[in-house]
Image: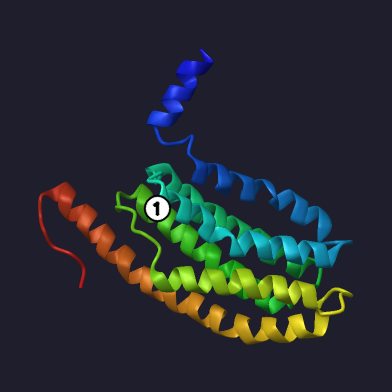
Amino acid sequence: MAGSQWSFLTRSRLATVPNAITLARLACLPVYLAWIDGRTAAAAVLLGVLGITDWVDGWVARRFGQGSDFGAVFDPAVDRLLLFVGAAAAAWHGAIPAWLGVAILVREALVASMLAGATLAGMERFPVSVWGKRYTFGLMVSVPLLVLGASDAAVADAARAAGWVLVAPAVVTSWTTAAGYVRRVRVGLAAARAARSGGTGVAG
């Protein structure tokens, strides 16, 4: 029985090394939540490692031909969750300003809701844009730096300064890409409607 289950997972591209790495990153999220209240510096380092190592699963998938449809959805979903929960917990505990937390969380919630609704309406999923990846990386580096800056670590002042230098362009880029996604969703929904009706038109 176990052998047949493993065979099914392998064929369906669930049991791959990149997906296991993504799952391990997700499993570290409760540790971050447990640490941020009393071990702020350790929480900051953990969140930073989880963000910086995002490229590892992608590299493994490309290098060893282990990409999968599931991984293409699972990995960015975990990235979004890490960013959302990481920023929310940081704002809740005062490690980052409330307005910054709101700017990050509202953007993520709006885009996630828009994409989920459009997908349910028949839109074909599209990959994350290059600038989307860049802003995500920027926030996954700058937010941990700001959290570290709120700790009593010896490098807190330097971390806080570096965090503010990086977080401003990352937030601006996040909202710019969100605006770009609105147009892509409009075009995708128009294409879905045209496919259902047998037409070929798309939104302008």
Left or right: 177 as drawn, with respect to 139 = left
Considering the image in quadrants, where does the C terminus appear?
bottom left
- Residue nearest the viewer, comparing 6 with 80: 6
- Residue nearest the viewer, comparing 94 with 66: 66
Most extreme residue toward the top is: 1
The type of colouring in the image is rainbow
Position in image of residue 4 (x %, y %): 45, 17
- Identified at 39% across, 32% down, the residue is 12
Position in image of residue 162 (x %, y %): 69, 84
Mark 1 is surrounded, within 10 Å at the Cα level, by few (under 14), some (14 to 19) or many (20 or more) other residues, namely few
- Identified at 77% across, 51% down, the residue is 31
- Identified at 27% across, 58% down, the residue is 189
State which quadrant residue 11 falls in. top left
Picture layout, residue 202 above or below residue 116: below
Most extreme residue toward the left is: 199
- Residue nearest the viewer, comparing 55 with 160: 55
Position in image of residue 71 (x %, y %): 45, 46
- Residue nearest the viewer, comparing 81 with 142: 142
Circle 1 is placed at which residue position? 62
Total marks shown come to 1
Q: Provide the secondary structure element on which disc 1 rests.
A: helix
Position in image of residue 169 (x %, y %): 55, 84
State which quadrant residue 13 falls in. top left
Most extreme residue toward the front is: 63
Q: Amino acid under label 1?
A: Arg
Left or right: 189 as drawn, with respect to 98 = left
